[in-house]
Image (tube, rainbow, N blue to C red):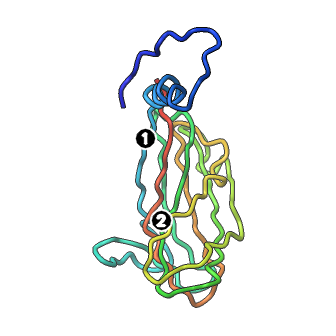
Amino acid sequence: MAWTDPTTRSTGLLVTAAIWNTDLVDNLEYLVETNERWFPFLYGNNAMDQRDYKTYITTTTASERAFVSIMLPDDFESLTSVEVVMACSTTEAGGLQIDYETLWGADGEDLAATSDSLLNQNTGALTEDQRLDIDISAAFTGVAAGDLIGLRANQDTSSKIAYWFGARVKYVSGA
């Protein structure tokens, strides 16, 4: 993406979608840099394993959990989205029920100074071994640069094998 100098327009000119996109949208995207970081799930009730060369943590019964630690960088300005990437070992028309809980603190704060959650979330229908990216941004209200965040995904559905690969954090960085 590159900066495009806006054209001088005359008063009363109708702003078309093309003008709007060129003069405003494209230039705003140039000015605002969106970043993405990947944080793999590294701990859970079950050992880490691999599937098709991708590492994951499994949850297999109700109340089993997968955990990931997320460190927001110093240039973090605002959150765009947080998505967990998972799959299921079988096709599940009714999906899985999952609780997402977060605890975080900044340098010099208690590790659990702040908490948030997104409880009783249904994944929607799952297809065997098909990747699913789930937006859980609502469990990260008020996070800031330098926060160390612990995320716990807690399976509420029994006897279903879920594969937890990681969390993708998208954010806008400061100038």
Residue 92, quarter of the rendered image? bottom right
Quadrant where the N terminus is found in the figure: top left
Query: Residue 34 appears at what percent x and percent y?
Result: 45, 38
Q: Height in image: 167 above or below 121?
A: above
Q: Residue furthest front?
A: 13
Query: Between disc 2 and disc 1, whose residue precedes?
Result: 1
Image position of 141 (left or right of 36): right
**Mark 1, residue position:** 35
In this rendering, the answer to whether 115 lies above or below 53 is above
Residue type, mark 1 in image: Asn
**Residue type at tag 2:** Val
Q: Which residue is found at the position 50% from the left and 9% from the top?
A: 8
Where's residue 139, x and y in %? Answer: 65, 54
Instruction: State the residue position of label 2.
Output: 85
Q: Nearer the viewer, residue 5 or 86?
A: 5
Above or below, comparing residue 94 to residue 174 in the picture: below
Graded by Cα atoms within 10 Å as few (under 14), some (14 to 19) or many (20 or more), the crowding at tag 1 reads some
Q: Residues within 10 Å of mark 2 (few under 14, many from 20)?
A: some
Instruction: Out of 131 and 2, give the one closest to the viewer.
Output: 2
Q: Gap in Å between the C-alphas at discs 2 and 1?
A: 17 Å
**Residue drawn where x is 42% and y is 15% of the image:** 5
Estimate the x, y position of residue 164 in percent, counting from the top left: 47, 71
Residue 71 to residue 102: above or below: above
Picture residue at 47% right of the left edge, 65% below the top: 85
